[in-house]
Amino acid sequence: MRKSLIIVATIFFGILSIGYTSTLFTGSFSNMNSVGYSTTAPIGQAYNGTPIDGVTVSKINPSTGPIYSSTSSGTLTSYNGVMFSSWGTGATTASNVFTGAIDLNKYITFSLTAAPGSQLDMTLLEFGIRRTPSGARQFQLRTSADNYASAFNNYTTLGQRSGSTALTNSGGTMTMDDHTSTGSYLGFRADLTSLAPSDSIDFRLYFFNAEADAGVAGLSTTLTFSGALVPEPSTGSMVLLGMGGLAAVRLLRRKVS
């Protein structure tokens, strides 16, 4: 009997190791731009990377509210990146004193959704930020993992701009130094390994404290994300327990007979 139990345990844990495989994935939005966004009908930046089996990637879109371009044509045809105005003022030229506050109704967002039976175990989000001279000076990244309750603050690398002093991070609030020309802070790397696996995840970038309401800020031209598809715990556990149980019953029946 003891030998039979050892064999059953071996079979069960063998099945367990086979069932709990994960599939790594990486995706990218590239050559992003704001052409087509308008004050009345934002069409969104569609995912233009390699399709990912088992993962649905949403468009990158602004929240509802007055954050579209204030240009006469209603579109941002002259800037590369997904960028908008009317983030809310609170900054002045050449000063790091801010009087505004984050508006939780104004953000740029996109989401990832796993196929039924799987979950997303995220590892990395990499992106760049771009602003015009009077655009928003501060931003935060928040996620649905905590229902957007706090600024994400686990970065391995902060974005840098050529010829710029270092961008500063205070508890997940990023502050960009002032410039007289439009430019990008590239290379933000957010380590997402602390987030628990989930069926879906939403990312939101909140911009605030612009120098002028018409100032423009947002994502630069490329955004990359990485993670793994893993079995959903409830589904995987039930299937594996069932398979292990059947194997045990069959083996014990053979021993009895």
Image (cartoon, rainbow, N blue to C red):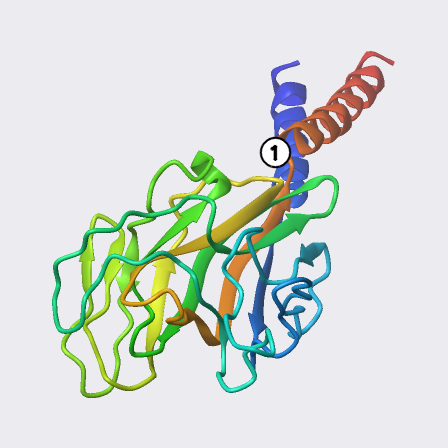
The residue that label 1 is drawn on is 13
Q: Viewer-proximal residue, 131 or 157?
A: 131
The reply, left or right, for residue 229 in relation to residue 168 is right
Q: Viewer-proximal residue, 100 or 207?
A: 100
Residue 235 percent across, percent down from the top left: 71, 31
Residue at the spot 68% in from the left edge and 33% down from the top edge: 236
Residue 105 percent across, percent down from the top left: 47, 45
**Outermost residue toward the right in this view:** 257
Residue 232 vertical placement versus 110 (above, below): above
Label 1 CA crowd tier, 10 Å (few <14, some 14–19, many 20+): some
Q: Quadrant of residue 34?
A: bottom right
Residue at the spot 25% in from the left edge and 57% down from the top edge: 90
Residue 41 percent across, percent down from the top left: 69, 63
Residue at the spot 20% in from the left edge and 58% down from the top edge: 169
Residue 43 percent across, percent down from the top left: 69, 66
Task: For mark 1, give the secondary structure.
Answer: helix
Residue 102 vertical placement versus 72 (above, below): above
Three-letter amino acid code of the residue under disc 1: Phe
Q: Viewer-proximal residue, 226 or 24?
A: 226
User: Could you tell me which quadrant the N terminus lies in?
Assistant: top right
Q: Viewer-proximal residue, 43 or 38?
A: 38
